[in-house]
Image: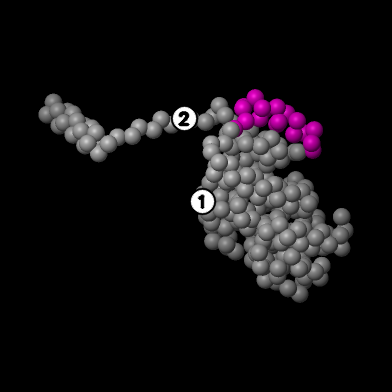
């Protein structure tokens, strides 16, 4: 894909992300790897109204080479992904509402709830918090990037990546859709997880659909019906609790005297 086409694609995906509420105002950033250069979005520009000439070019370390505007301050996140995933050629970062709600709550999306998500995303972990626009945020991704294709950024947003920009966009779109369904499902009751057998069958057909991302299953993801641990809840009255504590104290005193 030539540079002109890449510029047009970034503007197109930026419009889609803005229309889908994956970004608001000047949030988010996009990039495409072109050989030993990165074509990326500038800082301070709404992704819904990007023009091809707005985009900038950096080297593989994120140092700007050309472009009248300044590259996004979060380019270091992109650099980390490209360094650890040679199969990745494009990245989307945004603040999709429902996915970001999970990121703020520190809740990863790791349960086998929908076949499509198991096949396309596997598990989506939450990266440790890092201050936006700093090396700290980029470094928080290092251990996760090799094993996952979508990552929630604690108290921040989400980042997805793929072989091309449309694939990266579809992943962040699916992530947001799944996060919304997860929240709605739990408002209705307990979710029904897929069985381990069902998940294994889904992983077996991933290659058929051209999915060549990391084999998430080896990391115990996603969580299946068999992996759920039932927790028994015991309710005590105040008097029962006081009696129990008194008994424990008496037993402890006996042990000391012995």
Within 10 Å of disc 2 (Cα), the crowding (few <14, some 14-19, many 20+) is few
Q: Is residue 219 magenta?
A: no
Q: Residue at x 76, y 68 (%)?
A: 49
- Magenta region, residue range: 193-210
Residue at 70% over, 27% down? 201
- Residue nearest the observer in this picture, 215 or 12: 12
Q: Residues within 10 Å of mark 1 (few under 14, many from 20)?
A: few
Judge whether 100 appears above or below 27 on screen: above
Based on the picture, tell me whether residue 202 belongs to the magenta stretch. yes
Residue extending furthest toward the front:
188
State the mark number for residue 165: none
Inspect this view and state whether residue 125 appears.
no
Is residue 255 visible to the viewer in this orientation of the structure? yes
- Residue 4, how many percent across, how many down? 87, 63
Q: Nearer the viewer, residue 190 or 162?
A: 190
Q: Position of residue 42 (x, y in %)?
A: 71, 68
The kind of secondary structure the magenta stretch mainly shows is: helix
Residue 188 position in % (x across, y down): 55, 41
Residue under circle 2? 230
* Residue located beneath label 1 in the image: 105
Q: Quadrant of the N terminus?
A: bottom right
Disc 1 is placed on an element classified as helix
Residue 91 image point, x, y percent: 72, 54
Q: In which quarter of the view is residue 112 placed?
A: top right
Q: Relative to 118, does residue 73 appear above or below in the rendering?
A: below
Residue depicted at 75% across the width and 38% down the height: 212
In which quadrant of the rendered view does residue 252 lie? top left
| Between discs 2 and 1, the one toward the N terminus | 1
For this view, does 19 lie left or right of residue 140? right
């Amino acid at each position: 894909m030539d540079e002109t086409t890449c510029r047009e694609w970034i503007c197109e995906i930026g419009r889609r992300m803005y229309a889908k509420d994956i970004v608001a105002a000047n949030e988010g950033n996009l990039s495409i790897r072109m050989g030993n250069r990165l074509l990326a979005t500038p800082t301070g520009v709404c992704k819904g109204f990007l023009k091809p000439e707005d985009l900038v070019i950096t080297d593989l370390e994120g140092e700007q080479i050309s472009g009248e505007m300044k590259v996004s301050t979060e380019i270091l996140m992109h650099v980390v992904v490209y360094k650890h995933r040679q199969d990745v050629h494009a990245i989307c970062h945004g603040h999709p509402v429902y996915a970001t709600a999970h990121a703020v709550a520190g809740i990863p999306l790791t349960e086998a709830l929908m076949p499509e998500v198991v096949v396309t995303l596997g598990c989506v972990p939450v990266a440790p918090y890092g201050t936006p626009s700093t090396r700290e945020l980029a470094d928080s991704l290092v251990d996760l990037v090799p094993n996952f294709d979508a990552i929630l950024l604690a108290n921040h947003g989400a980042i997805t990546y793929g072989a091309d920009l449309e694939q990266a966009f579809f992943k962040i779109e699916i992530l947001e859709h799944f996060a919304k369904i997860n929240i709605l499902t739990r408002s209705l009751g307990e979710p029904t997880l897929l069985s381990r057998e069902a998940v294994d069958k889904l992983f077996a057909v991933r290659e058929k659909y051209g999915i060549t991302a990391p084999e998430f299953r080896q990391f115990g993801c996603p969580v299946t019906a068999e992996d759920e641990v039932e927790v028994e809840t015991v309710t005590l009255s105040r008097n029962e609790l006081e009696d129990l504590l008194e008994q424990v104290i008496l037993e402890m005193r006996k042990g000391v005297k012995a």
